[in-house]
Amino acid sequence: MDARETYRRWLLQLWQGDEAASDVLADDVVAHWPDREVQGREQLVALIAGTRAMFEELTFELQVGPLVDGDLVAARWSGAGRTAEGEESAFLGHDVLRLRDGRIAEYWVVSWTGPR
């Protein structure tokens, strides 16, 4: 699988609830947010599942990219979510990923969340 397809599986499958797509993650993946760091595939998959559990509906769209430069992949995405109570949220973000042996070894994200 090439780097662009790896990214698409990351955003459009794993983040949309297909845990089988976690095969795009290295076992020792490290994910960086501005306020936290997550280490290992299991912890990252659990964080994604926890995020999804906050919403009855959660979808993402690829806006720009993925752009590939060597082992780095970058993209811009948008998302929308609706809670069981009917609250709607919008999300915008940029991802940078470092691949190793075709899998995501490191992940950095900058994102914004607000009302829709």
Image (cartoon, rainbow, N blue to C red):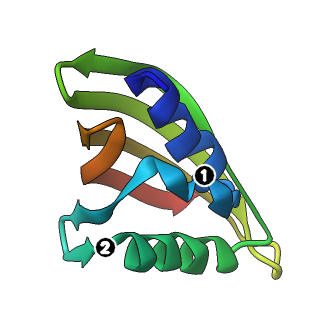
Rendered image quadrant of residue 97: top left
Left or right relative to 76: residue 39: left
Where residue 1 appears, x then y in whole percent? 49, 26
Which of 17/114 is in front? 17
Residue tagged by mark 1? 21
Rendered image quadrant of residue 83: bottom right
Tell me the crowding category of disc 1: few under 14, some 14 to 19, or many 20 or more residues within 10 angstroms, Cα based. some
Left or right relative to 81: residue 102: left
Toward the front, the furthest residue is 101
**Label tally:** 2
Which residue is pictured at 35% across the width and 35% down the height?
102
Which of 22/64 is in front? 22
Label 2: element kind:
loop
Label 1: element kind:
helix
Where residue 27 appears, x then y in whole percent? 34, 65
Which residue is pictured at 18% across the width and 65% down the height?
34
CA–CA distance in space, label 2 to label 1: 15 Å
Which residue is pictured at 28% across the width and 18% down the height?
68
- Is residue 44 among what the camera can see? yes
| Circle 1: residue type | Ala
| Circle 2: residue type | Gly
Tell me the crowding category of disc 2: few under 14, some 14 to 19, or many 20 or more residues within 10 angstroms, Cα based. some
Where residue 72 appears, x then y in whole percent? 20, 30
Residue tagged by mark 2? 40
- Is residue 116 among what the camera can see? no
Task: State which tag comes first along the sequence, 2 or 1.
Answer: 1
